[in-house]
Amino acid sequence: MLQPPHSSLQVAALPAQRVPARKRDQDVPWHTEAVCRRDEAGLFFAPSKEPTAARLSREEAAKRVCARCPVMVECREHALLQPEPYGVWGGLTAAERRVVLARRRRRDLELKKATRTTGRIAAAG
């Protein structure tokens, strides 16, 4: 079972492509269906002082596992909401998740700004 050093969840992976969603029992946690539960945790979390080429290869292998996971999207959202600082979750590395979070923050700020501008135009008109 996977268990990152900073979390009590026993799951870790997320992919770039989504396997079609299945209906799940709402009482069963999403991570019980994670494909990575059957794989080696080392695939999803970097050992200390890992060489760059080895890291990239390991991350690609982890992403391939994620790509076939039925709960990839749930895992990715978990990692983005926590936010999980280490490992491959939902097919995204920690660096990729930081980019997604930055884009979401930027989009939210733009939406707020657009809403304020629209409100002022409506009030003036």
Image: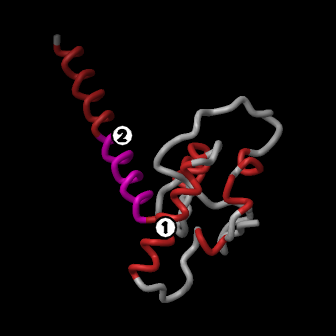
Name the amino acid, label 1. Glu
State whether the magenta stretch is mostly helix, strand or loop. Answer: helix
Residue 116, compared with residue 93, is above or below; it is: above
Residue 16: image location, x then y, percent: 46, 49
Instruction: Please rate how many residues cluster around mark 2, counting C-alpha atoms within 10 Å: few if below 14, some from 14 to 19, many from 20.
Output: few
Q: Nearer the viewer, residue 84 or 30?
A: 30
Name the amino acid, label 2. Asp
- In the rendered image, the residue lying farthest to the bottom is 49
Q: Nearer the viewer, residue 78 or 2?
A: 2
Rendered residue at 38%/45% (across/down) = 104
Rendered residue at 66%/75% (across/down) = 5
Q: Residue 108 carries which label?
A: 2
Quarter holding the N terminus is bottom right
Q: Quadrant of residue 115?
A: top left
Residue 43, compared with residue 100, is above or below; it is: below
Q: Earlier in the sequence, mark 2 or mark 1?
A: 1
Q: In this view, does 92 lie to the left or right of 21?
A: left
Helix, strand or loop status at disc 1: helix
Helix, strand or loop status at disc 2: helix
Residue 4, compared with residue 117, is above or below; it is: below
Q: Find out whether the residues at labels 2 and 1 contact each other: C-beta distance under 8 Å.
A: no
- In the rendered image, the residue lying farthest to the right is 27
Q: Distance between the residues labelled 2 and 1?
A: 29 Å
Residue 62 colored magenta? no
Q: Is residue 75 left or right of residue 112?
A: right
Residue 105: image location, x then y, percent: 37, 47
Q: Which mark is residue 23?
A: none
Quarter holding the C terminus is top left
Q: In this view, does 118 lie to the left or right of 90?
A: left
Q: Magenta segment, which residues?
A: 95-109
Instruction: Please rate how many residues cluster around mark 1, counting C-alpha atoms within 10 Å: few if below 14, some from 14 to 19, many from 20.
Output: many
For label 1, the residue is 59
